[in-house]
Image: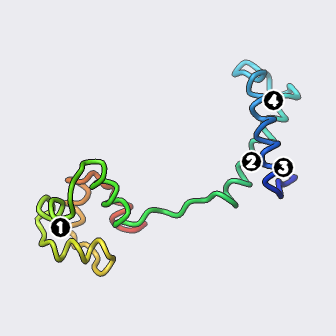
Amino acid sequence: MAQLKTEEAYNAAMQRIEELLKVVTDETPITDPNYQELDILSDMVEEYEDLHFSFSKPTLPDVIRLRMYERSLTQAAVAKLLGISPSRMSELMHGKMEPSYQLSRALCLKLNIEPAVVLGV
């Protein structure tokens, strides 16, 4: 399959996709040339975005900071919620310690953080 190699080509493909989305519907047969073009361009755009716009997985401290922001909590308030000392909370936030089983469970239950994030997988 052809590849999008420049940002200009990517932008042109995105513009063409927008045009095709106006004419291709759920009822459009897969043999329709517009459907096929849309399918190919979508794959090319996805490949380009995976290569140039990929995001890394958030770290546990990143997700904790997000939850703190969402709930307007301070680091001290989160430490109290989790039942740990402020100094342990600081170590956790700076990546200087891994959470214990009990702390991992509290992070999942009390801050609604996915277990995969807590476990780093």
Identify the residue under disc 3.
9
Answer with the quarter of the image where residue 103 lies. Answer: bottom left
Q: What residue lies at 86% left-to-right and 52% top-to-bottom?
A: 1
Q: Which color scheme did the rendering employ for the protein?
A: rainbow
Instruction: Give the alpha-carbon distance from disc 1 to disc 4, as whole Å.
Output: 52 Å
Q: What residue lies at 78% left-to-right and 54% top-to-bottom?
A: 7
Identify the residue under disc 2.
45
Q: Looking at numbered disc 4 in the image, what kind of residue is underneath it?
A: Tyr
Mark 1: few, some, or many residues within 10 Å (few <14, many ≥20)? few
Q: Front-most of 12 and 120?
A: 12
Q: Position of residue 8 (x, y in %)?
A: 82, 50
Instruction: Give the alpha-carbon distance from disc 2 to disc 4, as whole Å.
Output: 15 Å
Q: What residue lies at 78% left-to-right and 37% top-to-bottom?
A: 15
Q: What residue lies at 75% left-to-right and 42% top-to-bottom?
A: 42
Identify the residue under disc 1.
102
Q: Front-most of 68 and 113?
A: 68
Q: Looking at numbered disc 2 in the image, what kind of residue is underneath it?
A: Val
Identify the residue under disc 4.
35
Sequence-first disc among 2 and 4: 4
Q: Looking at numbered disc 1 in the image, what kind of residue is underneath it?
A: Gln
Instruction: Give the alpha-carbon distance from disc 4 to disc 3, as whole Å.
Output: 20 Å
Sequence-first disc among 4 and 3: 3
Q: Is residue 43 above or below residue 26?
A: below
Looking at the rendered image, the disc whose residue lies closer to the viewer, 2 or 3, is 3
